[in-house]
Image (cartoon, rainbow, N blue to C red):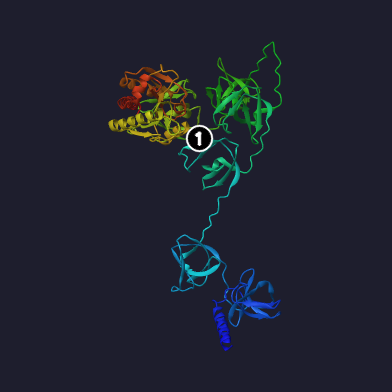
Amino acid sequence: MKMKLLKVALILSLLLFGAQIPAVEASTLDGETTVNLNVRSTPSTTGAVITTLPKGTKVKYGTYNQSWHKVYLNSRTYYASAPYIKRIASSPTTITTQAASSTGVTTENLNIRVTSHRDAKIVTTLKKGTEVNYAVHNSSWAKVFLSGKTYYAAKAYLAPKLVVSAPKKQSGYTNRDIQLFNRTLQTSPVAKTIPAKRAVTFSIHNSSWSVIYEGTKTYYTPTRGITAGTLKPATTTETGYANRDLKLFDTRNQASKVVKVLPLNTVVASSKYNSSWSTVYIGSDTYYTPTAWITPGVAPVQPPTTTKPVETKVQGYANRNINLFGKTHQSSSVLLVLPQYTAVTYSTYNSSWSNVFVGTKTYFTPTSWLTAGKAPSAPAASPQGKVYINTPGDVLNVRATASASSTILGKLAHGTQVDHYGSSNGFYKIKYNNRDGYISTAYASASKPSVSSGAVIVLDAGHGGTDPGAVRSSLYEKTVVLDVTKRTEAYLRSKYGYEVRLTRSTDVYLTLNQRVQAARNLRGDLFVSLHTNAATTSAANGVETFYSTSSAHSAKSRVLATNIQSNLMGEMSGMRNRGVKTANYYVITYNTMPSALVELGFISSPQDIVHLRSEASRQRMAIGVAEGIAQYVRAYH
């Protein structure tokens, strides 16, 4: 019997000592048992019963989980079923509070220990970059929670997990045709193109670019082409008619190029764009025009007349510098310019235009530019600036009016400084021998020209990048002309020491306007664009050079083109000479300097392609172009 009691006592001692656990980790609460409650050594119904507390016993406890509470008896921690302890109001005792856990990442391979001591037993080692839940234990150690248990690790090797928020997707629509790229670089290949007014899902990538989402794919596009929000409903189209000769523009700016002109009373379909402008629809094309130029409704029917109405002539004057045209639209050629306050005889032509009679000739001008009655005395004009005559080796004609066909009053030498009183129709107004005179703006510069300075030659290799130009098998126009352009540049630099600049020196795409702007930004004195030709028939062949008659520098451009064609054919005598021709190609029409465009041969011709493939022929082509340019430079610079 004594032996049995001794065994029971030993078991109870072991259970009591085994029940000791680390310091309390949850806030201590005051509670009361609601039944006779077993207190156990572990949070399990199989745990040893340490004691049974009668119903109504006051007890200190802390939350362990949803089913069990920790019960604190005699400075030791045990466990009891949570539903049978109710909380009673009491001030919490001073016991260490477990910090809320955080998600972190190990910054090194990290030992996990049973206690917060570097000599404690290692339970496991977590690899660098492992995600783990933890809480701060003290200044050096953290509690690590693994598989429902609490261990310890050095706090210095745990870092909070950075949460990267997903980009905020937005709804919007394209405000223009936009190009989609696989990279944030507009010189990279275009993956696809989306038309204007198309709904898109996007997110902001950086200050300039956005991400476009299409199904499971993503692309990049400049943010300026996207408007956030919902696309406005389709505009209401109205039928009306032109209440004057109707100019149509491709942008909402009357200073921009007139794309098309519709006669008075033409029926048009349009919609209001804003308070001043309307969109005009012709087939699948759209244009812009001032809303005031369209009258809603049906155009009035003009009654037939059997007799010509009596023309009433009015004496009046020009209330501004006025252009006189040969037709009733301002995109037609200006035939004559009359200064402000010039007395004129005119008669009404229609609701917008008048006939102006000068000698035996009749012109057209907008009626709003004329005022009936005697002209007031013109105020004394003040100079608006100074310019210098820029005609190396030549002189500049001073004319009586702003027209290349008017009377020559005299001539001014290269480098002469003059005051000007404004410009119109490509002419500066100046004072010459105490009277008004006019000089061409094309031969005047804001800075004094240097007699010894050489010309800046701009060479333009056509096409490039996504635009291969004419193609035959593996031979691309963009490749041929870039090679000849670089050879021409090298020849001009090495033989003559000329300043030569290229619009492109690599395989990149430039728009026509970008090429013109590049020539201007490079401060060129002349511009030569190189191309190869192509035709639907293999019989077409030969070399030809173009200049534009619509350019302000058409005279010099013709000389430049003639010199290049002559020297080029001297080098390429085996190819057909197609001569010098005129064409209003964009890069030679809108350039601000004498310009020519050279077609080096037909890539579609069996004869020409032999030369276009040959490096020796390309070098001879480059020499011919270069010598033609040099001949022009010697004459004008």
- Considering depth in this image, is 103 or 265 the residue closer to the camera? 103
Considering the image in quadrants, where does the N terminus appear?
bottom right
Residue 265 is drawn in which quadrant?
A: top right
**Nearer-the-camera pick, 76 or 449:** 76
Task: Report whether 351 appears left or right of 337.
Answer: right
Residue farthest toward the front in the current orientation of the protein: 1
> Which quadrant would residue 95 be assigned to in this image?
bottom right
Left or right of 535 on screen, residue 11:
right
Left or right: residue 628 compared with residue 584: left
Q: Residue furthest bottom?
A: 2
Q: Which residue, given by chain and number where applicable, does mark 1 sit on? A: 382
Amino acid type at mark 1: Ser
Against 497, residue 358 (above or below) is: above
Q: Secondary structure at mark 1?
A: loop
- Tell me the quarter of the image containing the C terminus: top left
* Quadrant in which residue 238 is drawn: top right
Crowd tier of the residue under label 1, counting other residues whose Cα lies within 10 Å: few below 14, some 14–19, many 20 or above: few
Residue 614 at what x, y percent from top left? Answer: 32, 25
Rendered residue at 51%/58% (across/down): 162
Instruction: Out of 41 and 537, give the one closest to the viewer.
Output: 41
Residue 319 appears in the figure? no
